[in-house]
Amino acid sequence: MDNPLRNCGRLHSLAGIEYAAQSMAAHGTLASQNSQRLPFLGYLASVRDLTYSTEWLDKAPAVLEIWAKCLFQSGSRSIYQFTLSGEGVTLLSGRFAVVYQP
């Protein structure tokens, strides 16, 4: 109930975009550590092919799973595909374009 993304006591499924973006940021940080370079500051540039099966995450399972895959990365930009699911049911999916600033 204390989730800061709630609005009027409800958590819209689009809040899952933030969850997926955080998982991609974590991936970027881990990847930069593996390559022994400093992580870049990333900005979400676009969301594409967004689909969701429920309007509210309030009714989603307590444990959510986020799957994200980097489809493309070149210098200052990357494209990720993501899926947010709960108990094997896809709740939200799409693609992100991310731009980086060193």
Image (cartoon, helix red, strand yellow):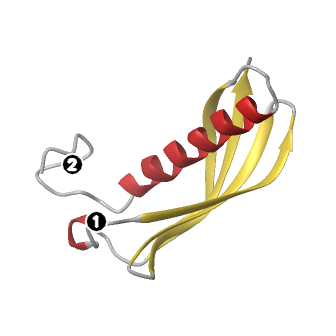
- Is there any visible trace of residue 49 in the rendered image? no
Crowding at dot 1, Cα within 10 Å, few <14 / some 14-19 / many 20+, comes out as many
Tag 2: amino acid:
Arg
Determine which quarter of the picture holds residue 86: bottom left
User: SS at mark 1?
Assistant: helix
Q: Give the structural element (helix, strand or loop) at label 2.
A: loop
Which residue is located at x 31 percent, y 70 percent?
Answer: 55
Earlier in the chain: of badge 1 and badge 2, it is 2
Amino acid residing under circle 1: Leu
Q: Circle 2 is placed at which residue position? A: 6
Q: Which residue is mark 1?
A: 57
**Is 102 on the left-hand or right-hand side of 49?**
right
65 or 44: nearer the viewer: 65
Q: Quadrant of residue 40?
A: top right
Q: Is residue 62 above or below residue 40?
A: below
Residue 77 in the image, given as x and y percentages of width and height: 79, 37
Q: Residues within 10 Å of mark 2 (few under 14, many from 20)?
A: some
Q: Quadrant of residue 37?
A: top right
In the image, what residue occupies the spot 72% across and 28% down? Answer: 100
Q: Is residue 18 left or right of residue 54?
A: right
Cα–Cα gap, marks 1 and 2:
10 Å
Vertical order, 74 against 86 (above or below): above
Residue 64 vertical placement versus 3 (above, below):
below
The quadrant of the picture occupied by the C terminus is top right
